[in-house]
Image (cartoon, rainbow, N blue to C red):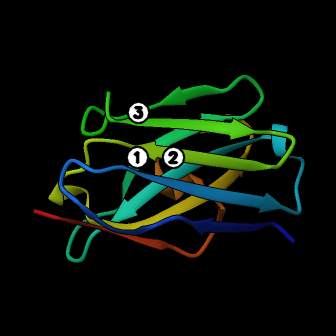
Amino acid sequence: DVQLQASGGGLVQSGGSLRLSCVASGFTFDDYTIGWFRQAPGTEREGVSCMTLSDRQTYYPDSVKGRVTMSSDNGKKTVYLQMNGLKPEDTAVYYCAANWGRVACVGTMYDYWGQGTQVTVSS
């Protein structure tokens, strides 16, 4: 079974940093795209960063570009999301998701989802 386990969320002050981790199992890691998505109460789910693992091509939306870096350790089947310069508007539940092949950073295109990890940024 495909499983994704996200961790690393927490409470941080504005301007602070967090690193989220997503450990994957049950599939051939390099064949997939893994994405980080977030959703705050009352808002639509938003793609934060997505990486096609075969070539590490990575997408960032303008809302996080320059503040967020996604990386992968293919040997550990783990992806990371380093977030710097956090703002209160980054507060959300963050999810990692996976889908076979190269897919866009759009949540509806991902079949497999992990549980979320809460990120709260205080002002």
- Closer to the chain start, of discs 3 and 2, is 3
Q: Residue at x 51, y 46 (%)?
A: 81
Q: Residue at x 44, y 56 (%)?
A: 37
Residue type at tag 1: Val
Return the residue nearer the eye: 46 or 20.
20
In the image, is 42 to the left or to the right of 98?
left
Q: Which residue is mark 1?
A: 48
Residue 60: give its label. Answer: 3
Q: Are marks 3 and 1 in contact (CB under 8 Å)?
A: yes
With respect to residue 66, does 92 lie above or below?
Answer: below
Residue type at tag 3: Tyr
Q: Residue at x 56, y 52 (%)?
A: 109
- Closer to the chain start, of discs 3 and 1, is 1
Image location (x, y in percent) of residue 29: 83, 45
Q: Secondary structure at mark 3?
A: loop
Q: Residue furthest left?
A: 123
Structural crowding at the residue carrying mark 3, measured as other residues with C-alpha within 10 Å and reported as few (<14), some (14–19) or many (≥20)? some
Residue 71: give its label. Answer: none
Q: Which residue is mark 2?
A: 81
Residues at marks 1 and 2, CA–CA distance in whole angstroms: 9 Å
Residue type at tag 2: Leu
- Closer to the chain start, of discs 1 and 2, is 1
Q: Are marks 1 and 2 in contact (CB under 8 Å)?
A: yes
In the image, is 9 to the left or to the right of 41?
right
